Amino acid sequence: MTARLDAPGRPGLCSTFCRELREPLAGTAVVADGWVLVEQSGPWGAKAPTQSHLDPDFGGAIDEACKKADVRFGLIRSPGRHPDAVERSHQVYVASTAPGRTWLLGGVVADPLELNDLDLEAVGRGDRDAVVDSLSALSAVDEPVMLVCTNGKRDECCALLGRPLVAALSAVAPGRVWEANHLGGHRFAPTATLLPAGTMHGQLSVKTAVAVLEAGARGETVLTGLRGRSTWTKRGQAAEIAVRQLIGELALDALRVVGEDLGTVTVAHRDGRCWNVPVTSAPADPPRPESCGKEPFAMSILHAGTPVPGDVR
C-alpha cells in the first residue's frame, strides 16, 4: 500500500532543512526507561498534557512525576477526525524499554485520573508485576504498537507529514498505530516510536514504517531512519547504531550499552563480543532550525566513529 507524504522538500520547513543537509539521525531519540500513554481525544495544544481536554492539573502533575521517574508521558488518539468532546473510556499503554525487561501493558480506564495509582518508579525499573499490582486494568499486550507524532500545534511538519502517514498505517495495522502529541525531533518528520522496544524512527515512508512494525513483531529493528533506543543515552544510541551498521545486527536485544567514558561508548553483544565506539559532538555547520518558525542555530550534532573491537565479555 502506498500513500503520498506531501512536501518533505517544501521550503521553510525544518524537516526540509534536515533532509537537504543530510543531518544524521542516530543519537536523536528521547531518553526514557519507560513510557506511559493515555488516550485523549479532541484538540491538543503545543503542550498537550496541560493544553487538551485532559484535566490540566492532572496532566501537568503526571508529566512531572514521570520525568522524575525517568519515564516518558504522552497523549495518544485514534487516527482520523478528533471531535472536541467525546464521552468514552481511555486506552492506556505502559512500557518498559530495557533489554531483558522489555514489556508492554495495555488497558482501558474510565477516567485518566486512575493513572494516579500507577507505580511510576516500578515502570522506570521495569518491574512489570508491581506495575500491574498498582493498576489492575493493565494486562500484557503481545504485539508492538507504533506512535506517530501528528501535533501540528507543536510543529507544522508533524501535521503535514505525520497525519498522512498514520492514516495509511492505520489501514495496514488497525488498532496498533496511534497519533502522538510529541516525540521530539520535529525536523526528522515524520517521526514514530515503536513500543515496547522504545526505538525511535525518522523520515519515515509508509513502506519503512510497515517494515518497522513487522520487524518489531520479530524482536528486530530496521536500520533505515533509526534514531535510537530510548533506554540508552543519546551517546549510547549513536554508538549502538554504529555497531548495528557495522555488523548488520537487527535483533533488538542483541546489543547493550555497557559503559560510557569521555568520548568513548562501549557496546556489548550477547555473544560476548564488545566494541569501543568514539562518539563526538560538534556544532552544526551550517546552523539550522530545531523546529519550524525558530531561528537557525549551531546545535550540537553527535557523530559516531568506527567501532573498535574490545575485550570479549
Image: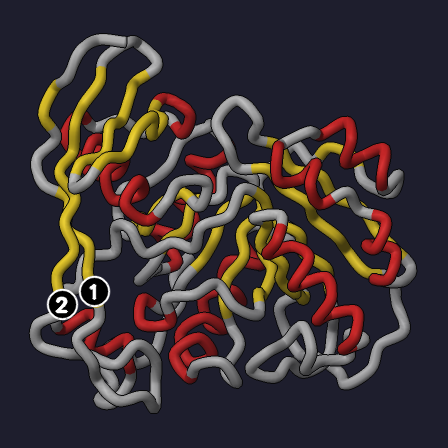
Is 234 drawn above or below residue 75 in the view shown?
A: above
- The residue depicted at 22 percent of the width and 18 percent of the height is 274
- Looking at numbered disc 1 in the image, what kind of residue is underneath it? Ser
Location of residue 126 (image quadrant)? top right
| Secondary structure state at the residue bearing disc 1 | strand
Quadrant of the drawing holding the N terminus: bottom left
User: In the rendered structure, are the residues bearing label 2 and label 1 in contact, judged by CB atoms less than 8 Å apart?
Assistant: yes
Question: Which residue carries the number 2 mark?
Answer: 283
Location of residue 302 (image quadrant)? bottom left
Question: Which residue carries the number 1 mark?
Answer: 300
- The residue depicted at 66 percent of the width and 52 percent of the height is 36
Can you give x and y, in whole percent of width and height, for residue 5 in the image? 36, 72
* Front-lying residue, 251 or 263: 263
Quadrant of the drawing holding the C terminus: top left
Left or right of 14: which side holds 184?
Answer: right
* Front-lying residue, 119 or 113: 119
- The residue depicted at 31 percent of the width and 72 percent of the height is 187
- Looking at numbered disc 2 in the image, what kind of residue is underneath it? Pro
Lower position in the chain sequence, tag 2 or tag 1: 2
Can you give x and y, in whole percent of width and height, for residue 309 in the image? 12, 19
Structural crowding at the residue carrying mark 2, measured as other residues with C-alpha within 10 Å and reported as few (<14), some (14–19) or many (≥20): few
Left or right of 120: which side holds 102?
Answer: left
| Secondary structure state at the residue bearing disc 2 | strand
